[in-house]
Amino acid sequence: MDYSIARRRMVEQQIIAREVEDPRVIDAMLQVPRHLFVESGLQSHAYSDASLPIGEKQTISQPYMVAAMTAALELRGGERILEIGTGSGYQTAILSLLVKRVYSIERIPLLAGRARKVLDQLCLSNVNIKVADGTIGWQDQAPFDGILVAAGAPDIPNEYLAQLETGGRLVLPVGDRHQQILMRVTRLEDGSLKREQLMGCRFVPLIGEQAWKADFPG
Ligand code: SAM
């Protein structure tokens, strides 16, 4: 299978056609070999318009959602970004091409380890990954120019707002365990917060001290 053709088709049909216009985001989506972030048996589906299982009951996000969330951060280059939910590392790789440094937190050690390996294989060296509860952010490294949360939260954890730089944007799904609204919160120059609802979405739950409990059924 020619993955570069599949990748170009993915970008044209799933990203550009749905009006993600940021040329830097489009370029990053064209560059990152998504098939390396999924299990070998699923590689032929890596460029399909869907999220896919990555083990541990978790998923690699749908390509469109990765592009839309990245575009919503309105990155210009030079930013320090906090990502919660490394998962496969695919979103991390996209961000790493667009910013100065990515700080990514994953609660499941196996996934963090696998993501690290693929990112190293691709020589993406501007990424720090930590295994921890990401609902309390990464206090030692705050504040961040952008925060991207790739799991659904019941509410916006206070620490994310506390760790957001002036002018910075927080993008996260907020809702119940099964469906959410993708929200963007911007810290304006006067310190106030602007909240926007971007679209409906479905993410696995954000599990931790400031979100859902791990033993919740379903
Ligand atoms: N964007 C990722 C990708 O493209 O592969 C997919 C992320 S997956 C939808 C959500 C991830 O969030 C899972 O790997 C899950 O283990 C992780 N997660 C859930 N709660 C977390 C928490 N409190 N801290 C860190 N990671 C968490």
Image (cartoon, rainbow, N blue to C red):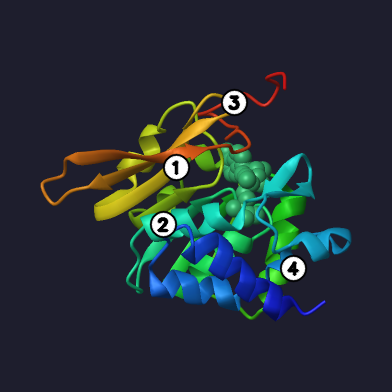
197, above or below 166, in the image? above
Q: Is mark 3 within 8 Å of ligand 1?
A: no
Choose between 109 and 175: the one closer to the eye: 175
Left or right: 79 as drawn, with respect to 27:
left
Q: Position of residue 96 (x, y in %)?
A: 51, 70
Secondary element at image label 4: helix
The residue labelled by disc 4 is 35
Ligand 1 sits in quadrant: top right
Disc 1: residue Cβ within 8 A of ligand 1's nearest atom: no
Asked which quadrant contains residue 13, the reply is bottom right
Packing grade of label 2 (10 A; few <14, some 14-19, many >=20) is few
Cα–Cα gap, marks 2 and 4? 31 Å
**Label 4 neighbour load within 10 Å: few <14, some 14-19, many 20+:** some
| Residue 161: mark in rendering | none
CB-based contact (under 8 Å), mark 1 and mark 3? no
Q: Residue at x 49, y 62 (%)?
A: 17
Amino acid at pointer 1: Leu
Q: Amino acid at mark 3?
A: Arg
Q: Residue 203, how many percent across, how many down?
A: 59, 38
